[in-house]
Structure formats: structure tokens, C-alpha cells
Amino acid sequence: MPTPAICLIVASTRTRRFADIPLTWLREELGARSDLSLDVLDLREHPLPFFDGPVPPSRNQRAYASEAEATVGQALDAADGYIVLTNEYNHGYSAALKNLFDTFFIEFRHKPIGFIGYGNVGGSRAIEQLRLVAAELDMASVRTSAHIFGHQMRRLREDPTAHAEVFAEVKPRLDATMTDLLWWANALASARDADATPTD
């Protein structure tokens, strides 16, 4: 079975965002694994116009309206699963991430998704909402998630020497999330392949 392609989606587009600190760690952690191939889709580097198409993506599949949409859509299409690094704004998730999910459908369908959240309560409220969106996109949302809480964020911002200690606290949850994500990625890739295989 081929190594699953996992797309790490970075949700925050702010110019002075916290996301860059865990993103560096995640690139190292996930990039060093031999059981997956990692691609990073940073929404700050791939701005999309707010979706205003006359037909929803579920009925107008891969009908990209611009080169920017095509670039992002093809990156999503190539993935076997997704891990989202999400911030939490006002007990919810970012507009850029919502727009991503509104702009595409078939690229996500029948694939697993996991979450790494950060915020005062570890991004938990944003992740709960994202699970509902994932269900509507016909995705498998893995039960386990990883969280960076407010007090950990403060340490990471203020003391670079504490990074190893803080991320050591987060790593067991990341490992558990990735174990589940890769199980689903392999299972659903096999199922998609079976669907695509002619029966006669």
C-alpha cells in the first residue's frame, strides 16, 4: 500500500500569528515520519476569494474559477487525509478556513481529518464546530485531537527554551491523533480505489 499523503492545513492568516511556532514543530515531527508523506497548505500563502459561485462545489466538482482555486484544489485532491492546525476566534474557527471548506467538496469527500487546536481552551470549541463541517463534507473526523492551551501558548511565545518541554506535553495527543488519522487514511484509500475499479 502506498504511503498516505497527508496535507497539513494552516488555518490562521494573521500577519503576527501564533501558528508559526507549532507549525515549525509539526513540520519536524510529521516530516520525519516514514509512514506518511507531508504537504503543507498554508492559507496565508494561498488566499482564496470568498466563494460566490452560482452552483455549490458538491454539484460543480473541480470547476475551478481561478488559478488560485485550482492550485489549492489540486493540493487537496492529492491528499489521502488532512490534519488542521486551527486557531480559535470568538469560540469558533477562522473565516479563511470556513471559506476553504465552502469552496471545495469532492477533494475532501471520503477522506479523514484530524485537528490540532490552540487557544485558551486548546481550540476545543473551534474543533467541535469543524467536526460538524467535516460530516457535511462526507469526511471521517478522527476522535482524538491535540491541543495547545493558553498557558502553554504564553510559555511558547515568551520563552524559546521552553519549546521542547511544552511540545513534549502535546506530543502524546499528536501521536494518538496521527495513529487514528493514518488508519482511516489507509482504509478509505482502499475503499476509494475499490469504488474506482471497474466491475466488468
Image (cartoon, helix red, strand yellow):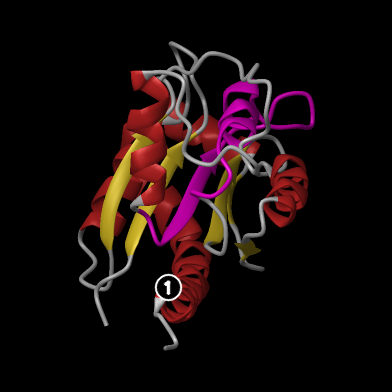
- Span shown in magenta: 79-107
Residue 143 at x, y percent in the picture: 66, 68
Magenta-colored stretch includes residue 100: yes
Residue 97, given in percent of the width and then of the height, sits at 58, 31
Q: Residue 144: which quarter of the image?
A: bottom right
* 33 relative position to 152: left or right: left
Q: Is residue 190 left or right of residue 25?
A: right
Quadrant assignment, res 5: bottom left
Residue 100 visible in rendering: yes
Residue 33 pos. (x, y %) = 24, 66
Which residue corresponds to mark 1? 196
Q: Is residue 23 at all visible to an observer of this figure? A: no
Residue 152 within the magenta-colored segment of the rendering: no
Label 1 CA crowd tier, 10 Å (few <14, some 14–19, many 20+): few
Q: Say which residue appears at 39% left-offset and 79% top-offset.
A: 197
Residue sticking out furthest to the bottom: 200
Q: Is residue 33 above or below residue 60?
A: below
Q: Residue at x 37, y 30 (%)?
A: 70
Asked if residue 2 is positioned above or below residue 163 in the image, the reply reads below
Quarter occupied by the N terminus? bottom left
The local secondary structure at tag 1 comes to helix
Quarter of the image where one finds residue 31: bottom left
Residue at image point 58% right, 31% down: 103
Q: Amino acid at mark 1?
A: Ala
Where residue 4 appears, x then y in whole percent? 32, 68
Which quarter of the image is occupied by the C terminus? bottom left
Between 141 and 61, the residue placed more toward the observer is 61
